[in-house]
Image (spheres, rainbow, N blue to C red):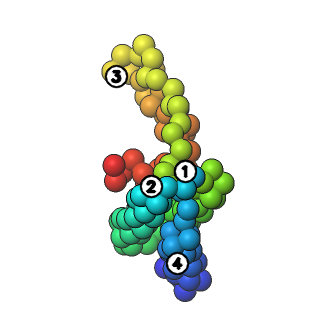
Amino acid sequence: MTPVTRQEVLGLYRKIFRIAKNWQSASGQIEETIKEKQYIRSEARTLFRKNKNVTDAKMIKQCIEECEARIEIGLHYNIPYPRPIHLPPMGLASKQGRAFRHQEKLRKFSKPIYLKSHDDIS
């Protein structure tokens, strides 16, 4: 990891914890605010620790983009949780063959960047 990339990652990590410190839930309830703050901190720790040994520059860039996307979405919608999405169902394809592989490929490409690592830890 280059020093510039390292500083960028550490800056994102600090930014997430600053957001968690000042986070206010949409409902304004204290219990819900505390729960959401804890979620933000634990999610950040889990994902950053999971990816701490990533050395491939392309993967690091993808993780940074995912982090930035989740921050922006969280701040915009005022929810810390990943936004649910609708993925196309597997349809009527049999469990093997070209049609099945094609549908799997479509599902993979239709998943937004901010959910790539979330499914790995859930």
User: Which residue is disc 3 drawn over?
Assistant: 96
Q: Quadrant of residue 67?
A: bottom right
Give the amino acid type for the residue marked by disc 2 in the picture.
Answer: Glu
User: Which residue is disc 2 drawn over?
Assistant: 32
Secondary element type, mark 3 = loop
Residue 103 at x, y percent in the picture = 48, 26
Give the amino acid type for the residue marked by disc 1 in the picture.
Answer: Ser
Q: How far is the residue under mark 1 from the one under mark 4?
A: 25 Å
Within-10-Å neighbours for mark 2: few <14, some 14–19, many 20+: some
Q: Pick whichever of labels 4 and 3 is earlier in the sequence.
A: 4
Position of 91 with respect to 95 (left or right) is right
Residue 81 at x, y percent in the picture = 48, 51
User: Which residue is disc 1 drawn over?
Assistant: 27
User: Which residue is disc 4 drawn over?
Assistant: 14
Q: Are marks 2 and 1 in contact (CB under 8 Å)?
A: yes
Give the amino acid type for the residue marked by disc 3 in the picture.
Answer: Gln
Q: Pick whichever of labels 2 and 3 is earlier in the sequence.
A: 2
| Front of the two marks 1 and 4 | 1
Q: How far is the residue under mark 2 from the one under mark 1?
A: 8 Å
Residue 80 at x, y percent in the picture = 51, 55
Within-10-Å neighbours for mark 3: few <14, some 14–19, many 20+: few
| Front of the two marks 4 and 3 | 4
Q: Residue 16 versus residue 90: which sits nearer the camera?
A: 16
The residue positioned farthest toward the bottom in the image shown = 3
> Is 35 located above or below residue 115 in the figure?
below
Q: How far is the residue under mark 1 from the one under mark 3?
A: 47 Å
Give the amino acid type for the residue marked by disc 4 in the picture.
Answer: Arg
> Is 83 located above or below residue 13 in the figure?
above
Q: How far is the residue under mark 4 from the one under mark 2?
A: 23 Å
